[in-house]
Amino acid sequence: MALPMDSAILHIATLLLLLLLLPHDTIAQAYSNVTLGKSLTAGDDNTSWPSPSGDFAFGFRRLDNTDLFLLAIWFDKIPDKTIAWYANGNTPAPRSSTVQLTNDGVLQLSDPRGQEIWKSDPINGAVAYGAMLDTGNFVLVGSTDNNSDYIWETFKHPSDTLLPTQVLEVNGVVSSRLTETNYSTGRFQFRQLQDGNAVLNTVGIPGTFAYDAYFVSNTFEANASESGYRVLFNETGHIYILRRNGSIKGLNLNDFPQRRNYYYRATLDFDGVFAQYIHPKNSNGSQNWSMVWHLPGNICLASRSKLGSGTCGFNNICNLTAENRPTCYCPPQYSKEDLSNIFSSCVPDHIQSCNRDEPGYSDDVYGFEELVNTDWPQSDYEQLQPYTEGECQSNCLEDCQCAAAIFRDETCWKKRLPLSNGMANSSVNVNGKAFLKVRVDSRPAKKDEKRKILIVVLSLLLGGSVFVNFLFSGGICLFVFLAYHKKLKKANKVKYERSSVGGKLCSFTYKDLEEATNQFREELGRGAFAIVYKGVLELGARKLVAVKKLDRVVQEREKEFRTELGVIGQTHHKNLVQLLGFCDEGQHRLLVYEFMSSTLASFLFQAPKPVWNQRIQIAFGIARGLLYLHEECSTQIIHCDVKPQNILLDDCYTAKIADFGLAKLLMTDQSRTQTAIRGTKGYVAPEWFRSMPVTSKVDVYSFGVLLLEIICCRKNVPVEILEDNNGEILTDLAYDCYCQGKLDDLLQNDMEAMSDISTLDRLLRVAIWCIQEEPSVRPTMRKVTQMLEGVVEVPVPPSPSPFNSFLQN
């Protein structure tokens, strides 16, 4: 909304006065000029060219856990040294690279061999010197009488951040980075267009083609003199669109703290949110940037480009967190293409073929996952009406191109892959349903076997006498009749079994599994009520399996067995061990799982310590699996026994959560339960012993303990404590070492982890939040996952045991 003319004139006059006075005032300050020929070298000495007050510095910043460097400007007085500008995000510089202000007045970045990596734009006029200003702007100053002309400046070439007094001109572009730690050009832009609008849009990468905007400032006017042409970020923290007639339109009209006490920045984050942050100047080290304003209000709903994937990657579902940040997750039977990037596309775990000769063609192996308040609004290829829900499902099942269908108000929208602009929100698809086509039967087709039998029968018929053919034909008819009735009876039985156990599991006889395990010969492990054996089954191909045999069939165990079948049969996630089938024959109760190579326990507690990055990815996978169990499957599952022995690893070290036999299940309209103590010593949450209601936060506590073990490669309760009460409990030691800055003592000289100090600090903070004694203080697994992946900041955690801390103080 444009301000009244008197107010507008006052704002413009003040703003122009600030802009006119700023260069003279800044240059007049006492500081050391960067003379022509001066240079910096990328290394560990962290030399830089500081601003007069020391608020900002220009130089090299090392990228985490690499030997590569960014040429950057950063806030130099705050602990995390937040980067405000960078030159070479797409091409990080190796160690010993140099940046020089050449005698020609050009900033040039070269690698150790002298090859050019980046340089500032060609200039018109002579350069006298360079200077790092207190505004965060690095300038090349012209050699004129008043030394006030900036021939080149970083403010005219922004990366992902705008600073107070910075102006974004027509055709100016602010680009996000690719991820939080990858400074390559990302998928989002903030631009000032020639038509007068300032917009946020996604972009096709690699490339610069801009897709449809997900925010528009609406400052375009038919009369060009009234259109916008500049984005201004003034010293009071307000961001305006300046129109050519002198009026302004405010983007953020909030009142902000006085700038003399706070640093300001406006950043287009890697998730596409354009956010304004403030940070206390007199920070004690525990304070972080606080978001005070952002665009758009809900990026998941705002992004509806016809091209590209939307806010998240293809085949994703976007959901807004409580912190107004987008989070992206895969729908059932889809997995992340890049596990290190939550915004990467999801790929289906099954292949639907339109070739009738391929096993994936048959429509009887497909069904639907029903999703509420979910839609992919830009993926329609057919609209059918009037239609019933059943007709919509049938039409999609019969169409090999159909990957999902939306049914609402007697209308059926069919969608094909890849699905784009996926979103989940209470305002989305109200009174409608989303049906995602998924594979429900993995058994191989027997078309080839039937074809061979048919050839044999025809050969006999054509080669025999009439009488023999008559007898043979009669026999075939009788055989077909009996086979049909047997098949019908079996189909009804299978239909009953499927309806009672989830619809995706194979039913095996006890003899099948006895043969598969070679008379239950090779034992993989045993628990309180089951023994697990290694086996081989023919499931389209020879497949290693783990067969879990319940050794005592009593009422309690049989109930748990049925619970596992009914719930786990409907779960599907990359970080969960897949249940393939079952045996429910007489007194025999067995479960058939996919086979895994090893457990986290055998992987983690060994010498030498496993690779740090591998441990991080395992932790991320476990967190995603627990998030799925708690929030994303149809029936909430509380595991209740999260420990290294129940985390299995495949050949690629992908973490998969196992053993749901102890899980306490809740319907979606319940939130807590009260039951007998379950779990393993050292991983059990305190509320189990306090007669408190048990919620999903018990798994959060166990995950916190597990995360500390992954970080430190040591057991929470050492063998020494179990045997003779000697040694230290890891959860107690971790908080003490973190507070006292003695991470070397905690990690026992793990130099690989210590060299990645920012990730280490984040993971330790998350772990300490998870092991808080008070359940309500612990984060949810969704928040845990976001903190681990760097989507949200992790505040400094309090003492896990407030009472013990009080006694110590």
Image (cartoon, rainbow, N blue to C red):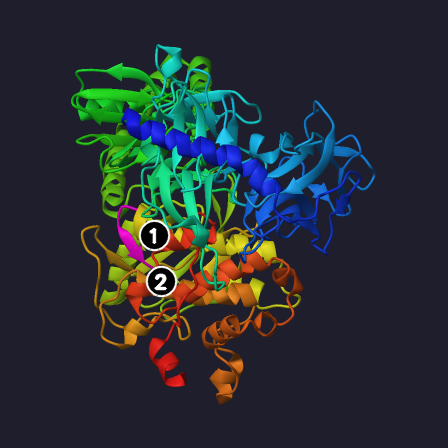
Among all residues in the image, which is located at the extreme top? 222
**Residue 591 falls inside the magenta stretch:** no
> Where's the N terminus, which quadrant?
top left
Question: For mark 1, does the 10 Å Cα neighbourhood hold few (<14), some (14 to 19), or many (20 or more) residues?
Answer: many
Q: Secondary structure at mark 2?
A: helix
The answer, for residue 582, to whether it is visible in the render is: no
For the residue marked with disc 2, what is the amino acid? Asp
Q: Nearer the viewer, residue 185 or 579?
A: 185
Q: Which residues are magenta?
A: 633-643
Tags 2 and 1 touching, CB below 8 Å = yes
**Marks 2 and 1, how far apart at CA:** 10 Å
Q: Secondary structure at mark 1?
A: helix
> Where's the C terminus, which quadrant?
bottom left
Query: Taking 269 as reference, is 715 above or below it?
Result: below
Q: Residue at the location (61% across, 57% down)?
A: 756
Among all residues in the image, which is located at the extreme bottom? 724
For the residue marked with disc 1, what is the amino acid? Leu
The circle drawn on residue 699 is: 2
Residue 25, image x, y percentages: 56, 41
Q: Residue at the location (48% across, 88% down)?
A: 725
Question: For mark 2, does the 10 Å Cα neighbourhood hold few (<14), some (14 to 19), or many (20 or more) residues?
Answer: many
Q: Earlier in the sequence, mark 2 or mark 1?
A: 1
124 on left or right of 559: right
**Residue 642 falls inside the magenta stretch:** yes
Residue 679, image x, y percentages: 36, 70
| Residue that carries the numbered disc 1 in the rendered image | 629
